[in-house]
């Protein structure tokens, strides 16, 4: 290997390491924000209390959710924990594939959001056997949710948009688990 290739390879490795570090730092900050918001709610409100933010539209409403979205799989915290771990492993692999191919930056951001949300709620399920929810849109009677749910929802919808309308099939090939010939 000549000197130019060695320097280029070293720069590439540093760039990848920096990207991983940024992703990990972002992930940790997002999880901390989620956990601090839940801590604040549990230490300043009583269970089932509500604080109107916009009368009859939006309120802070503290509840415990023993299930997943909309209460499905209620009291199945171990199963939900296993799903979260599998999703995180899968997400981390997809993130690494995108990063090493030096592509799909927006998708990598979405993956960090989704993983942060999954871990934020996983922490609650493992600590309490329920998730702390507190964001409630009363006007449409939407199920009560939390910051981690926002991360997952935003990450999922942006990912779906990117896959359907932005990325070309050739760009998404980097995500394939097929062996290269």
Image (tube, rainbow, N blue to C red):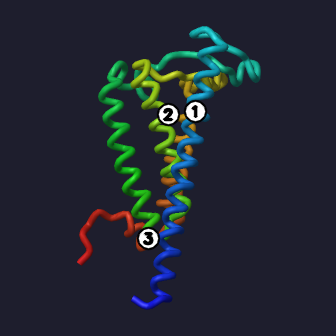
Location of residue 65 in the rendering, given as x and y in whole percent from the top left corner: 47, 20
Q: Residue at x 55, y 60 (%)?
A: 106
Q: Are marks 1 and 2 in contact (CB under 8 Å)?
A: yes
Quarter of the image where the N terminus is located: bottom left
Q: Characterize the local packing of mark 1: few (<14), some (14-19) or many (20 or more) Cα atoms within 10 angstroms.
A: many
From the viewer's perspective, is 134 left or right of 70? Answer: right
Location of residue 116 in the rendering, given as x and y in whole percent from the top left corner: 50, 41
Q: Earlier in the sequence, mark 1 or mark 2?
A: 1
Residue 6 tag number: none
Q: Residue at x 50, y 57 (%)?
A: 20
As drawn, 125 above or below 12: above
Depth check: give the residue in front, 21 or 93. Answer: 21
- The quadrant in which residue 80 appears is top left
Q: Residue furthest right?
A: 54
As drawn, 40 above or below 35: above
Q: Earlier in the sequence, mark 1 or mark 3?
A: 1
Residue for badge 3: 101
Q: Residue at x 58, y 32 (%)?
A: 34
Location of residue 57 in the rendering, given as x and y in whole percent from the top left corner: 71, 24
Residue 120 tag number: 2
Q: Characterize the local packing of mark 3: few (<14), some (14-19) or many (20 or more) Cα atoms within 10 angstroms.
A: few
* Whole-number angstrom distance, CA of label 3 to CA of label 2: 28 Å
Quarter of the image where the C terminus is located: bottom left
Q: Residue at x 50, y 88 (%)?
A: 4
Q: Residue furthest front?
A: 3
Say what secondary structure mark 1 lies in: helix
- The quadrant in which residue 94 appears is bottom left
Depth check: give the residue in front, 11 or 169. Answer: 11
Residue for badge 1: 34
């Amino acid at each position: 290997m000549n000197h130019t290739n060695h320097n280029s390879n070293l720069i590439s490795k540093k760039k990848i390491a920096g990207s991983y570090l940024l992703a990990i730092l972002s992930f940790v900050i997002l999880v901390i924000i989620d956990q601090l918001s839940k801590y604040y709610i549990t230490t300043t409100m009583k269970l089932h209390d509500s604080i109107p933010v916009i009368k009859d539209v939006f309120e802070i409403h503290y509840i415990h959710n023993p299930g997943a979205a909309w209460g499905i799989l209620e009291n199945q915290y171990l199963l939900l924990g296993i799903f979260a771990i599998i999703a995180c492993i899968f997400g981390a692999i997809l993130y690494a594939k995108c990063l090493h191919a030096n592509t799909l930056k927006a998708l990598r951001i979405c993956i960090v959001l989704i993983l942060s949300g999954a871990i934020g709620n996983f922490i609650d399920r493992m600590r309490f056997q329920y998730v702390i929810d507190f964001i409630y849109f009363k006007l449409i009677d939407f199920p009560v949710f939390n910051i981690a749910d926002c991360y997952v929802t935003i990450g999922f919808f942006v990912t779906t948009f990117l896959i359907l309308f932005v990325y070309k099939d050739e760009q998404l090939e980097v995500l394939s688990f097929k062996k290269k010939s």
